[in-house]
Amino acid sequence: MEIKFDIVKKLGVISDGDRGWKKELNLVSWNDGEPKYDIRVWNEDHNRMGKGTTFTTAELSNLKKLLSQIEDL
């Protein structure tokens, strides 16, 4: 089964990796579903990707709250 994706909005680069791949935060629709916030590595052309994780708006909001509580950041 082929995975269909559409990067609805590019939000930013988290880090640059080897061979031009970048870890990014994007808003992505997977298999024509509702867009979710997505963190993963992408190649330069955005036609290949590595493993990542997705968040609903509520999940990303909870993550933001958790990150704000980390004193070392």
Image: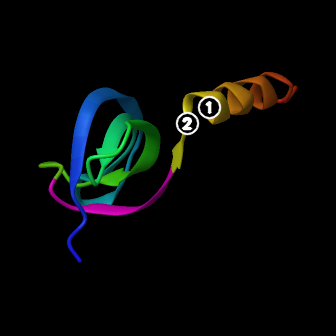
Residue depicted at x 21% and y 61%: 48
Q: From which residue to which does the magenta span run?
A: 47-53
Q: Are marks 1 and 2 in contact (CB under 8 Å)?
A: yes
Direction from residue 17 to residue 67 in the image, left or right: right
Q: Which mark is residue 60?
A: 1
Q: Secondary structure at mark 1?
A: helix
Judging by the rendered image, the residue that carries numbered circle 2 is: 56
The image position of residue 40, as x and y in percent, is: 42, 51
Q: Secondary structure at mark 2?
A: loop
Is residue 26 located in the magenta-colored stretch of the structure? no
- Dominant secondary-structure state across the stretch colored magenta: strand
The residue under label 2 is which amino acid type? Thr
Residue depicted at x 65% and y 35%: 59
Position of residue 31 relative to residue 6, above or below, is below
Choose between 14 and 3: the one closer to the eye. 3
Position of residue 60 relative to residue 43, above or below, is above
